[in-house]
Image (cartoon, rainbow, N blue to C red):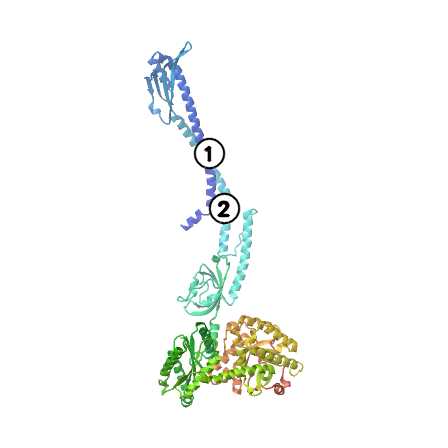
Amino acid sequence: MSKLGDRLSSLSVGMVVAMAAGLFVPALIGIMTLSYLRQEQINKELSAYLDERALQLSNSLAVPVWNYNTVSVRTIGQSALLDPQVVRITVSDSDKVPIVVLEQAQRRLGTSQVVQRPLLMRGNGTEELAGFVEIEVDDGLKQQEFARDRRAYAFILLGQFVLSLGCILVALHLRVLRPLHRLTLFSNRLAGGDFEQSIGWERQDEIGHLAHQMDRMRSDLKTSFAEQQVILSNVQVGVLFVRDGKLHIANRHAEQIFGYGHGTMAGLPASALYPANGPLPDTRLDEELRFLQRQDGTHFWAQVRKRSLDPRLPQAGSIWVIEDFTARKAAEDEINSLAFYDPLTRLPNRRLLMDRLKQALVASSRSAKCGALLFIDLDHFKTLNDTLGHDKGDLLLQQVASRLVTCVREGDTVARLGGDEFVVILEDLGENPEEVAAHCRVVGEKIFSALNLSYSLAGHDVRSTPSIGVALFDGPRDSIDELLKQADLAMYQAKTAGRNTLRFFDTAMQAAVSERAVLESDLREALRQQQFALHYQPQVEGQSQITGAEVLLRWRHPQRGMVSPSYFIPLAEETGLIVPLGYWVIHTACAQLARWALRPETAGLCIAVNVSAKQMQQDDFVPQVLALLRDTGAPPHRLKMELTESVLVVEVENTIIKMDALKAHGVGFSLDDFGTGYSSLTYLKRLPLDQLKIDQGFIKDILVDQNDAAIARMVIALAESLGLRVIAEGVEQEAQRAFLANCGCHAYQGYLMAPPVPIADFEAMHDPSVCRTGDAACDSSAPRSTADASRP
């Protein structure tokens, strides 16, 4: 039925119908016009004939009727009936009384016309009425004659119509329809992907020109299609062409990703690539990370990029580029899991706790409702650990973690700080502090009830009690560090009170907090009095080759003496003093680089400077650094900036722009404490880094903690895959250095090599005979690979 419909709607049928109509309609109009004119002529002729016959009869019958000679009247009437068109003759007297009626009724074949004439006697100039004659004639004979003429004319016109139509069809078929049919077959082959056979004929008219253009199009399509096939076959991503919700084209790599055989993906619905119980694809998204489904039903992570062929015509279809993200997503998830969750208890670790606490403070500020921070420490845990062993201690910590989770609501947070220290965040507790404190006591009782129960540790039944400190918060005016300190102080007060009890932070504990305000004032004064100095910790490659140093800030207080950086650096971050302090550090480091550049034995050394997030967020950070380099004359490629992952938490795009600007002038970048913050492979591959730095927290127990060792190996492998150098900090034992070297890390920093020392001691320590000018470990323009960094 469909084929019949296609034929009826074809061009040839349409043209035949149009030509037939063009010939037939004029012929039909001609026949109708001629018929009308002929009928009019017949009517006129019949009227004239009737008038003529009536006049003859009236002249012939006047005397016989006047004399009432019926025999003559009948004789004259019968002679008139000899005409086959005459049907009836009626002769009557002056009173219209019929005298003679003659009729041939069988002659009525068509339309009759009747006319009546008076019979007048004329004599001596007078006229007298003798009677009347009425004659009726029929046009049947004329109509029969006309019908014969009309049939003959119709046959003539029909013959002309058939002959003309046949001649036109032959010419049309030879000159138009057959060439168009060949062009149609040719275009169908092109649509089916057959670009090999040319059209094979030439003509000089318009159809020939069209054929030539289509053959050129075939050649161009053949070349273009071959190029596309080469590209699609060799590109290492899956490429799909989707239209009307179905797959029309899939390259070989896409078939391999989804586990389909060659050519079997065409025709599948696009929804077949997505899990049946998952959300359907969103065609409006240009890019998304989605869970997709292979042919065998297994699922995998993939990056899906969608581009419409014509945004104005959605029906034109779209191109999907599929990249298997399984390995990268697994690596990122593993790094995030190791970085944000405690591997022993699977609770959030300190890093994630800080983020959750920050969110809790913001939420508390918005809702005007208080929250609480519970600091939990297990009593006599060290004794149990030393008595039963670390494996039993680990089992106890795991059971404590699982019990703590059951004591709080689903939205609350339970985290492990480390060792036997746990923290609980309770949110949205209410606006009345007394009610909040009462709720905390209820939660504390639940914790005591759960943790005071005995523990079964591989055949050993033991008991352990907790000491709990509580600090309340009601918004961002409470800093995270202050809250932790307050809860910690309250916990120690609970231990002092005899353990296995709960204490709230009170005003007596504020003395320790007040010390912070005094220290902040001293820190501002120290900036004015320039009480700071830089110490230099060597960065070593191989066994003993010094390639540079990391500068570490030291503060010699006039009364306190040496103040620990772990004490005043966080305070500087919180107060914003880190910005001018950081500027001084970079200026001092650049001045030292400029002095080293003048001496051949130190010209190859580089200096690593820590840059805080607040410094990087300053709008004039890049111009300031470039001005310092220019004013001091320091070589930019000897300056290396160490960024912590906290820099990436805020304004990532702006940070990348600033890094690119400094990188263009030769400044190098190292990602410090990698794996301890908000690591993201998505941003990591976009950052213009030269080096990853393994955090000393992973190095400390790298020989005894399998998780730390796994993280170190992963960072080294990740750096190598990204073409980055890697350095480990906090190396204190030769066994740690040997382990790192065996994993592929050959650059170190730590007390095994040397502690941070003043500049004079560092320069005395440095051996000019082994310093290499332009060393790859310092030079940001050198090849970025661990293999290059480890060359002797």
The residue identified by callout 1 is 30
Circle 2/circle 1 CB separation < 8 Å? no
Front residue of 490/723: it is: 490
Using a 10 Å C-alpha cutoff, classify the residue at mark 1 as few (fewer than 14 neighbours), some (14 to 19) or many (20 or more): some
In which quarter of the view is residue 758 placed? bottom right
Look at the numbered disc 1 and give the secondary structure of its residue: helix
The residue identified by callout 2 is 177
Q: In this view, does 177 lie above or below 392?
A: above
Q: How many labels does the image show?
A: 2
Q: Distance between the residues labelled 2 and 1?
A: 30 Å
The answer to whether residue 352 is visible is: yes
- The amino acid sitting under disc 2 is Leu
Q: In this view, does 152 lie to the left or right of 530?
A: left
Front residue of 614/7: it is: 614
Residue 50: percent from left, percent from top? 40, 21
Front residue of 233/383: it is: 383
Q: In this view, does 274 lie to the left or right of 551?
A: left
Q: Which residue lies furthest to the top in this view?
A: 124
Residue 346: percent from left, percent from top? 42, 79
Using a 10 Å C-alpha cutoff, classify the residue at mark 2 as few (fewer than 14 neighbours), some (14 to 19) or many (20 or more): some
Front residue of 124/326: it is: 124
- The amino acid sitting under disc 1 is Gly
Q: Is residue 513 above or below residue 253?
A: below
Q: Is residue 751 left or right of residue 275?
A: right
The answer to whether residue 566 is visible is: no
Residue 191: percent from left, percent from top? 49, 55
Residue 174's mark? none
